[in-house]
Image (tube, rainbow, N blue to C red):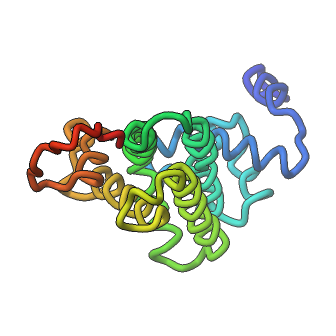
Amino acid sequence: MTSPSEGVRRRRVPALAPDERRAALIAATVPLLHECGIEVSTRQIARAAGVAEGTIFGVFPDKTSLVVAALLHALDPQPTLDAIAAIDPAAGLRERLARAATLINTRFTESAHLMAGARKLVFATGGHPEAAARMAESRDRLTEVLTDLIAPDAGRLRRPPATVARLLLLFCGANSFGPFGDPARFDGDELVSLLLDGLIVRPTPTTGVPDRC
């Protein structure tokens, strides 16, 4: 005889196609990754998704595959790419880069623990080449959108726009993931100042021509 609680549990778990079930499990897993990290259990995932643990293995071969899929979903760069692409191209180079650096700093800082999990599961083991390729593609897309943002001022820079883009990503990455990073102190404006101006004090221009960086 089915207990009332079992009846409620069964009624709240609709039959889904495999792709829909995978998407639902990924959606349930992402918040748990933020809360518990990659050590989250299938029991926790099943409880969050409102399914039996066995349901997970009907659409994923193992827990790691589900966790990797959830990491890729959580680390999707598209919102950041769209935000960078929406920066006003009429703004000065310094302002454009500062806005982009702020967006990237925020993304990197909020996802630092997820990136650590991805490095452990995807890159350290080498067991998920498709996931590794997707993450590499995400890095390339981020570099490309930054390069496009910088390109209108290419003639004012001592390095090609793509190199400047990689340097800015290097600064943001070290600031978010490195042991000496301090995103609260070294914000987007500070990183862009370091990139464009360096650290050596320069003489004040006497030409009367304003610096429009």
The C terminus sits in image quarter:
top left
Res 159 → quadrant: bottom left
Q: Nearer the viewer, residue 167 or 92?
A: 92
- Residue at left offset 44%, top offset 56%: 115
Is there any visible trace of residue 42 in the rendered image? Answer: no
Q: Nearer the viewer, residue 145 or 52?
A: 145
Res 85 → quadrant: top right
Instruction: Determine whether, in the image, residue 83 is placed left or right of residue 110.
Output: right
Q: How far across and how far down the image is residue 116, in percent?
A: 40, 59
The N terminus sits in image quarter:
top right
- Residue at left offset 49%, top offset 65%: 162
Tell which residue pokes out farthest to the front in this image: 207
Say above or below: 50 vs 76.
above
Say above or below: 7 vs 92.
above
- Residue at left offset 34%, top offset 52%: 172
Q: How far across and how far down the image is residue 176, in percent?
A: 31, 50
Q: Nearer the viewer, residue 24 or 98?
A: 98
How many tags in the picture?
A: 0
- Residue at left offset 29%, top offset 41%: 211
Instruction: Determine whether, in the image, residue 16 is placed left or right of residue 148.
Output: right
